[in-house]
Image (cartoon, grey):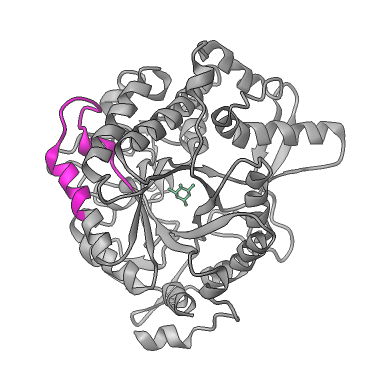
Amino acid sequence: MMEVSEQMDTYGLKASDFGKDFIWGVASSAYQIEGACDEDGKGKSIWDTFVHKKRFLIPTVITHETGDVACDFYHRYESDIATIADLGFKANRFSLSWPRILPEGTGKVNQKGLDFYSRVVDANLKNNLEPWITFYHWDLPQKLQDKGGWLNRQIVEWFGEYVDVVTKKLGDRVKNWMIFNEPLSFCAGGYLVGAMAPGIINPFSFMASVHHVNLCQAKGAEVVRANVSKSNVGTTHVIAPVHAMGKSGFHLKAKESVHALMHRIYIDPNLGLGYPFGLSPIIDQVKRFIKDEDEQNIKVDFDFIGAQYYSTTVAIPVPLLNGVPTKPKRFNGQDADMLKSPVNPKGIYESVQMLHEYNRFKNITITESGFSCYDTVENKRVIDLRRVDYVRRHLPEVLRAKKDGIPINGYMYWSFMDNFEWALGFRPRYGLIYVNFETLERTVKDSGWWFKKFLSQ
Ligand code: FCB
């Protein structure tokens, strides 16, 4: 297999050009890879519920697939982690399933669940992979959803308890923590447009979920810092640079409104900048959920901010709403991934630049970036040169940003292996490792071998 790596053309790119302290990693999440949905005392999450539901007689996951088994990482973590290390990565970003640890969301701890993550941490350390843990990558305990989930303000206490349990167990070995994965995706996806669990569509209460998440950012960081010495605490956000469709005031206003809805409502309050009122009637709904003491309790000084970049966005002007986001249309000759997101390498520069313009973030870590495409499987070789092409076109933009003084300290590819892509099932494949979902056999793709060569130079 080594020969495949050696044959790869790295187009003059070398990991060493990014500096010796640059963090090279991969990212994944619990629900998308673990499986073992009801094993060893695990409670149900909102995703366990959502994938088995039907709406208007149509399954929520159109392909009828579920993450019940997913990649079976729960039983195969040792070899999977060894493979990540073999490809040359030095960091592994993964998330914990809250209901595996606290089946009811609060109260009684499921020791077997906590022990599983302890073994996963040890397996990373044994392979010289630095663990980067996300507390919440969308799989809320169903028992807490039954009490309103992110719409219930009590979640700040529930979340604090969960972070406390986890950090007391793992904080002796894990220093890097991310409070959330992409609040935009699970708040807007889950409580505004209903495409993600728990599938609620409600423009009036949606901002309650955003506000409670923002309070939990601060609460979570406070608990980590109390329990873990020398911690590196941050959070992650989808950063999709917003472009205007035209030059008129109407278009520019739509752009501001979409930028506020996609980024500012999740970032500004934690920086003590408040909510961007007046840009969208949806955002203004938050006033109903803010209490006096929140202004102080929402501020958080993160050690790093995670930028997750896939594609850019265009703002469509809409009367009354100002603007709503869409992915830009593909123009002639422009490449796009399986989800029709256009490939725009300059966008990764724009996204970290946008964060840097806040002038508040000490470190910006690219905690996700990746590409889904159809892979060709030929005699045990998986050819995915379009993914290689995606990576080799984005990395120079990351390096350019770093050279321009933007404090980027790492890049994590999404994802190390193909996995369950939420409501889209198993079809979109983002992995560096191919997973045959019938047999669960893994095969390193050409892109994985490409990274191996790039990282060795
Ligand atoms: C990101 C999510 C991740 C995965 C990738 C493709 O938005 O954080 O779980 O779905 O997209």
Furthest residue toward front: 229
Q: Nearer the viewer, residue 299 or 38?
A: 299
Q: Is residue 233 magenta?
A: no
Q: Nearer the viewer, residue 54 or 233?
A: 233
**422 left or right of 201?**
left
Which image quadrant is residue 382 in?
bottom left
Query: Residue 215: image x %, image y %?
Result: 46, 25
Magenta extent: 95-119
Query: Residue 187: image x %, image y %?
Result: 48, 31
Q: Assign the N terminus to one quadrant of the image.
A: bottom left
Furthest residue toward right: 248
Query: Residue 151: image x %, image y %?
Result: 42, 20
Image point 39% across, 72% down: which residue? 88
Tell me: residue 189, above or below residue 457. Answer: above
Q: Nearer the viewer, residue 163 or 418?
A: 163
Image point 39% across, 31% down: which residue? 222
**137 left or right of 184?**
left
* Number of marks in the rendered image: 0
Q: Nearer the viewer, residue 70 or 170?
A: 170
Which image quadrant is residue 14 in?
bottom right
Q: Is residue 439 visible?
A: no
Image point 58% across, 44% down: which residue? 361
Query: Residue 389: image x %, image y %?
Result: 57, 72
Tell me: residue 300, above or below residue 230. Answer: above
Q: Is residue 113 magenta?
A: yes
Q: Is residue 37 visible?
A: yes
